[in-house]
Image (spheres, rainbow, N blue to C red):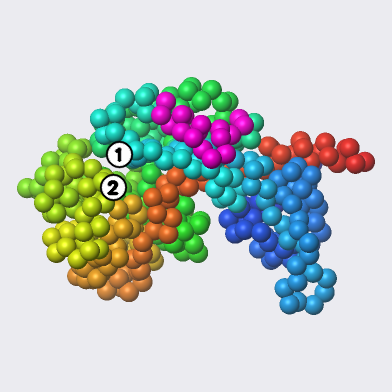
């Protein structure tokens, strides 16, 4: 590699460091960027100039921070300069969003998904139609960097094949390819498991900001998990890690939709809460809402159903805390709703089943981003190409602007 190539590689890495800092941490003064990235003031000045010329960043009037010397201008990313389209496929809902730089939510549309509606191509059609119901309308394709998809299933990360999604009724569905063909855009489509994306979103913008060892447990009809170790996702050999809902806990238990007996999700998923409240396991999300509302109103049957589920959740979390030694457990989906009602029960059972040392380090909290965590995580992975190499997408704009002003 010659000197010119090395210089260009360093420049790209430095631009990435600035853009990633602004994206993950919000607007920064030039002085703060020096501190956060380790670059010199002169390098920050030149590189921020490139980002401004490319239309990816702006600078506001100088801000004083109580320090001596000249105040430093504040640098912000332009949210709409590059956007991601994100989709979420759950058992009961579909969602679409447009998310810009800095994690700015530019539009969101969510709709119910009938459980009998299992044909993947029809679900893809429904997802794409949601783009027309966004408050801002369908985004212009030239502004879209990539598409991210969160799905409740086992996903092969390299090509977006949904190997198995028992609660959706899918086996070997090429979801990434189907969606790319339906959209007709020449951009990547990235498909990931919803819990892997949920933990990413909560780490960057939710309950786990600043915490690098995190267990995210997401519950709906099924149960999934996402794990960060030292800030990095634990994905497994092909992206299949985190299927904690299918840990066997009762050899004489119920038949799970995956085909096994006594999986954890049969004891803590939405169906378990409904059954304990005296309702059919498949009564659906409205019935589940009624159970939570009844518990709020003091109904003892509903309260007991939620507390018992919380205890079963807590005992399983004890084993997971022993296994992964997280500093934080984030409860997403219905578990975030369950937490305020069953916080004490969850913690008591977790204490009973966790070794003292890892137990002393961990906190259990509800997801801050709620049901949108997987969707926002899908946007984050879709924007990753810009964060990793902003020069590839925007460098030509900066060069044209520099030539025009010469």
Give the residues drawn in magenta, as a range. Answer: 125-141
Is 392 on the left-hand or right-hand side of 98?
A: right
Determine the CA span between mark 1 and mark 2.
8 Å
Q: Where is residue 214 shown, x and y percent of the image?
A: 40, 59
The residue indicated by pointer 1 is 91
The residue depicted at 64 percent of the width and 35 percent of the height is 143
Whether 77 is drawn above or below 393: the answer is below
**Given contact means CB atoms under 8 Å apart, are the residues at marks 1 and 2 in contact?**
yes
Is 370 on the left-hand or right-hand side of 284?
A: right
Q: Where is residue 239 shown, x and y percent of the image?
A: 39, 41
* Residue 231's disc number: none
Direction front: furthest residue = 297
* Residue 220's disc number: 2
Question: Which of 157 and 306 lies nearest the eye of the viewer?
Answer: 306
Q: Quadrant of the N terminus?
A: top right
The residue depicted at 37 percent of the width and 28 percent of the height is 123
């Amino acid at each position: 590699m010659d000197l010119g190539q090395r210089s260009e590689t360093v420049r790209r890495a430095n631009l990435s460091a600035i853009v990633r800092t602004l994206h993950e941490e919000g607007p920064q003064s030039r002085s703060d960027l020096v501190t956060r990235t380790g670059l010199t003031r002169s390098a920050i000045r030149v590189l921020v100039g490139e980002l401004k010329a490319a239309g990816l960043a702006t600078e506001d009037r100088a801000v004083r921070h109580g320090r001596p010397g000249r105040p430093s201008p504040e640098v912000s990313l332009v949210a709409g300069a590059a956007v991601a389209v994100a989709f979420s496929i759950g058992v009961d809902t579909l969602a679409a969003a447009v998310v810009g730089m800095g994690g700015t939510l530019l539009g969101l549309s969510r709709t119910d998904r009938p459980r009998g509606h299992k044909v993947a191509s029809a679900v893809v059609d429904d997802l794409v139609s949601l783009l027309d119901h966004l408050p801002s309308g369908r985004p212009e394709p030239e502004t879209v960097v990539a598409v991210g998809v969160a799905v409740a299933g086992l996903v092969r990360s390299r090509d977006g094949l949904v190997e198995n999604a028992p609660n959706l009724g899918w086996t070997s569905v090429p979801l990434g390819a189907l969606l790319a063909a339906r959209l007709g855009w020449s951009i990547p489509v990235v498909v990931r498991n919803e819990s892997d994306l949920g933990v990413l979103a909560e780490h960057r913008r939710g309950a786990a900001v600043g915490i690098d060892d995190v267990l995210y447990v997401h519950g709906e009809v099924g149960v999934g998990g996402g794990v960060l170790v030292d800030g990095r996702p634990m994905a497994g050999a092909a992206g299949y890690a985190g299927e904690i809902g299918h840990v066997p806990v009762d050899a004489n238990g119920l038949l799970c939709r995956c085909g096994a007996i006594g999986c954890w999700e049969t004891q803590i998923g939405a169906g378990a809460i409904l059954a304990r409240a005296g309702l059919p396991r498949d009564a659906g999300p409205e019935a589940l809402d009624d159970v939570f509302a009844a518990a709020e109103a003091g109904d003892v049957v509903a309260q007991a159903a939620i507390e018992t589920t919380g205890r079963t959740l807590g005992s399983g979390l004890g084993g997971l805390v022993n296994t992964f030694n997280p500093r934080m457990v984030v409860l997403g989906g219905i578990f975030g709703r369950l937490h305020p009602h069953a916080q004490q029960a969850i913690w008591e059972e977790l204490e009973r089943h966790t070794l003292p040392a890892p137990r002393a380090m961990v906190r259990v909290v509800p997801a801050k981003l709620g049901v949108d965590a997987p969707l926002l995580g899908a946007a984050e992975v879709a924007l990753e190409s810009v964060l990793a190499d902003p020069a590839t997408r925007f460098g030509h704009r900066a060069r044209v602007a520099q030539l025009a002003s010469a």
